[in-house]
Image (cartoon, rainbow, N blue to C red):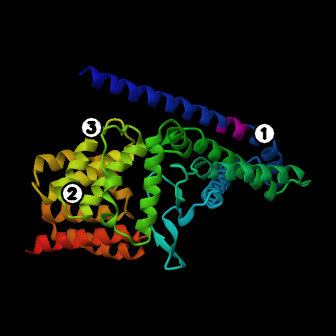
Amino acid sequence: MGDLKKRKKGKKSKKGLGFIIFLMFSAGIGFLMGWLSNGILGDFFDSYISSDLWYMEIFKIILILLIFIFGLIIHIFIHEGGHLVFGLLSGYEFVSFRVGSFVLIREDGRLKMKRYSLPGTGGQCLMMPPEKKDGDFPYIIYNLGGALANIIVSLISIFIAVNLKELSWIKVILILSSVVGILTALTNAIPLKIAGIANDGHNIRAMIRDKDSRESFYLQLRINGLLSKGIRIKDMPYDQLILREDIDYKNPLNFSRIFLNHNYHLDKMDFEKAKEALVFGEKYDAYTIEIYRMELRAEMLFLELIEDCSSERIEELYTKRLEKYIVASKFMLNKKRIMMAYEILYKKNQERGWKYFQELKELADKYPIRGEADMELMLADYLKDMIET
């Protein structure tokens, strides 16, 4: 009981710290907006959009927000491009480049566009790490590359804007996008968990402090790279996936091993051992990030559906939060599989269940991770046979 209280207290203190940091960033944005409004933007609007009409003030605010959104989209590209460039310089191999739900991958020697998204992230550049040298690999510059790119481009933009003699749209866009770029760099380089996702700075700090975290990060990238080439996780060496008791699974990077172990057994169709991995993960559920908690619940729900199908347990797992998360994960194949099982085996809604089956098959053709897609198609066919017999 005392341990549970300490755990809750620890979570509250972390949330409090996160809220303070959020307030500081909000105050920083407010200060910058005020400075820009009274300075450069004020002069710009006086020159180009001068009016005493009240709705023109609303128009100015909307205009500033649109430029900020435009700058954010550009800096997501720049950020992921930074990971790509610094990764290549460190010996990494290109695997995929994602902005939003659009993913560029290399498949059969050609670049192809696929669809995938991860809730809580705007983009992602995944690469295959180089072979280890003396048991280690370059991880700091790869993780820091995105923030460095944001800072470099922002400083160049500010330099160009300052040296432009005339006040113009170009100058305003450059300055506003630079503000976005600097904020993007800071929110990625300063160790934080944003929307339940550990950022680059958080991962770097964890890997510097803990050798197991470095190994977990390396393992994630390595396995993702192999899966993207069409290699199934069941065909990979199992010894690297064993869940050792001496690892700190409270760390999100190490917690990811639980899903790798689970997927290995799932691909082997060994549902009992797949469940053992999830039960092992439940011990650290309260410590891990939100996205992992939701993934754990989602996969536990699937195993419950195909085995005992207990109404009480299913209602306990399928909460409103999980439902919302699954809806937000519409480009993730395992959610189609889980909802197919939920609708047919629990809700007895054949029409909706087969709709998810068709969506899974269609999405699999556009999925960037071929090895995972093949596993999901196999599991969907297993469900189909299970239902029809």
Q: Residue at x 34, y 27 (%)?
A: 8
Quadrant (top left/top right/bottom left/bottom right) for the N terminus: top left
User: Magenta span has 284?
Assistant: no
Q: Is residue 341 shown left or right of residue 34? A: left
Q: What range is drawn magenta here?
A: 29-34
Q: Nearer the viewer, mark 3 or mark 1?
A: 3
| Measured Cα–Cα span from mark 2 to mark 1 | 56 Å
Who's the residue at 22% across and 66% down the image?
340
In x, y percent, where is residue 309?
Answer: 11, 55
Give the amino acid type for the residue marked by disc 3 in the picture. Lys
**214 or 303: nearer the eye?**
214
Tag 1: amino acid: Asn
Q: Which residue is mark 3?
A: 283
Who comes first in sequence, dot 2 or dot 1? 1
Residue 195 visible in image: no
Q: Callout 3 environment at 10 Å: few (<14), some (14 to 19), or many (20+)?
A: few
User: Which residue is label 2 attached to?
Assistant: 302
From this view, report whether residue 367 is shown above or below residue 312.
below
Residue 180 location, x and y as percent? 67, 48
Badge 2: residue crowd in 10 Å (few <14, some 14–19, many ≥20):
many
The span from disc 2 to disc 3 (Cα, nearest Å) is 19 Å
User: What residue is pinned by disc 1?
Assistant: 38
For mark 1, give the secondary structure.
Answer: helix
